[in-house]
Image (cartoon, helix red, strand yellow):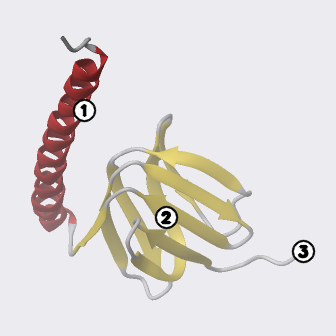
Amino acid sequence: MSFASAMQVSLRVPTHEVFSGRVVKLFAVAENGAFGMLPNHIDYVTSLVPSVLILSLDDGRELFFGIDEGVLVKKGYEVDIAVRRGVQGDDLDSLNDTVQVSFVEVDEEERVARSALSRLEAGIVRRFGELRKPRL
């Protein structure tokens, strides 16, 4: 039986890969609470909640990521993490500021897009309603 000293971790958002590398330990938060994972952890699948993801690299450094909801899948020594949004910070203090700026900015853009979509849907419904009226 062989034991690994590191996992290959990939952190992805829909548009690109945020991180890929060798990790000796990770810390994340799932719907049922926080957990840690080492390379020889059993295969595992869980949904993640908006939180801080901490990756400990094999050179002793720790990387901090602010993540939105997503999924973590560990199979063998590979861990794939797919999240809706994710940003890296230099430390926990700066990560909070980075998350606020990045996520709030995106939330505002989504709000504007949803508002435009609602107006478009209302216009379509109104036009369909006019089609059903008998013409005199």
Name the residue at 22% across, 20% down: 130
Determine contact: label 3, label 2, CB under 8 Å: no
Name the residue at 48% across, 81% down: 20
- Which residue is disc 3 drawn over? 1
- Which residue is disc 1 drawn over? 124
Give SS at disc 3: loop
- Which residue is disc 2 drawn over? 26
Name the residue at 62% across, 58% down: 73
Outermost residue, front side: 136
* Amino acid type, residue under disc 3 in the picture: Met
* Amino acid type, residue under disc 1 in the picture: Ile
Instruction: Decide: few, some or many residues near mark 2? Use Cα within 10 Å; few <14, some 14-19, many ≥20.
Output: many
Q: Position of residue 93 (x, y in %)?
A: 13, 62
- Answer with the quarter of the image where residue 128 lies: top left
Instruction: Decide: few, some or many residues near mark 3? Use Cα within 10 Å; few <14, some 14-19, many ≥20.
Output: few
Give SS at disc 2: strand
